[in-house]
Every structure is written in structure tokens, then in C-alpha cells.
Image (cartoon, rainbow, N blue to C red):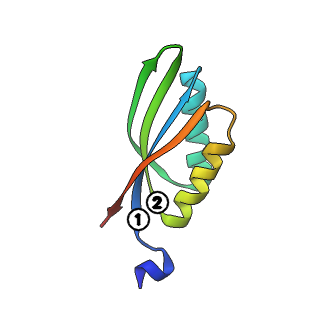
């Protein structure tokens, strides 16, 4: 029944790259707030000349889809990649 209504929560891990780490953080937080999602396990690394940010977001399948689209639409990131998904209980 949960699968039918897409009610299961998943933790999806994303990787974004860009030149301005502060701008990337602000943009991720802005999108999270507008979609009412939670961020956890953030890792930032210098990948000269860019920065690489890896983070996980909890949400239902539909929420994750919208979040991913919003990340891809943003000009704050040079590259957006979905690294994987894990089901939450």
C-alpha cells in the first residue's frame, strides 16, 4: 500500500559542483526550505577549481523527483548528480 501511494521515505544522496561554495549552500538550503525537506550528512571538498558538495535528503519519491528537478534547474551548480537512494523505515 505504501508503494502505491509513494509514502515511503527515502534518503537520496546528491553531488553538486560549482565555483562558489557559499552560493551552493544557500541554493541547496533555499530549495530544501521551499520543498520542506530535510538535509543531512553534508560533505564539502575542494576539487580545484570547483567545490564538490555531497549531501543526503529525506523525502518521499515524488518529493525527491521535484527536488532533483529544482537542483538541475538552478544556475548555482555546474554539475548535479544523484548518487543513490536508500529506503528509510
Is label 2 in a helix, a strand or a loop? strand
Q: Label 1 neighbourhood size at 10 Å, few (<14), some (14-19), many (20+)?
A: some
Q: Compared to 66, does 78 lie above or below? A: above
Residue at figure coordinates x 49%, y 14% from the top left: 48
Quarter of the figure with the C terminus: bottom left
| Percent coordinates x, y for residue 34 in the rendering | 63, 51
In space, the residues marked 2 and 1 are separated at their CA atoms by 5 Å
Question: Helix, strand, or loop for circle 1?
Answer: strand
First in residue order: circle 2 vs circle 1: 1
Asked where in the image residue 26 lies, by quadrant, the reply is: top right
Q: Which residue is mark 1?
A: 9
Q: Nearer the viewer, residue 50 or 62?
A: 50
Q: Eyeballing the image, is 11 above or below 3? A: above
The answer to whether 23 appears left or right of 38 in the picture is right
- Residue sitting farthest toward the top: 49
On screen, residue 87 above or below 13: below
In front of the other: 80 or 29: 80
Amino acid at each position: 500500500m505504501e508503494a502505491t501511494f509513494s509514502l515511503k521515505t527515502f534518503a537520496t544522496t546528491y553531488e553538486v559542483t560549482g565555483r562558489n561554495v557559499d552560493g551552493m549552500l544557500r541554493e541547496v538550503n533555499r530549495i530544501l526550505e521551499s520543498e520542506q525537506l530535510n538535509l543531512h550528512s553534508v560533505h564539502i571538498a575542494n576539487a580545484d577549481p570547483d567545490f564538490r558538495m555531497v549531501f543526503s535528503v529525506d523525502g518521499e519519491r515524488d518529493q525527491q523527483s521535484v527536488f532533483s528537478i529544482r537542483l538541475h534547474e538552478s544556475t548555482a551548480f555546474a554539475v548535479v548528480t544523484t548518487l543513490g537512494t536508500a529506503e528509510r523505515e
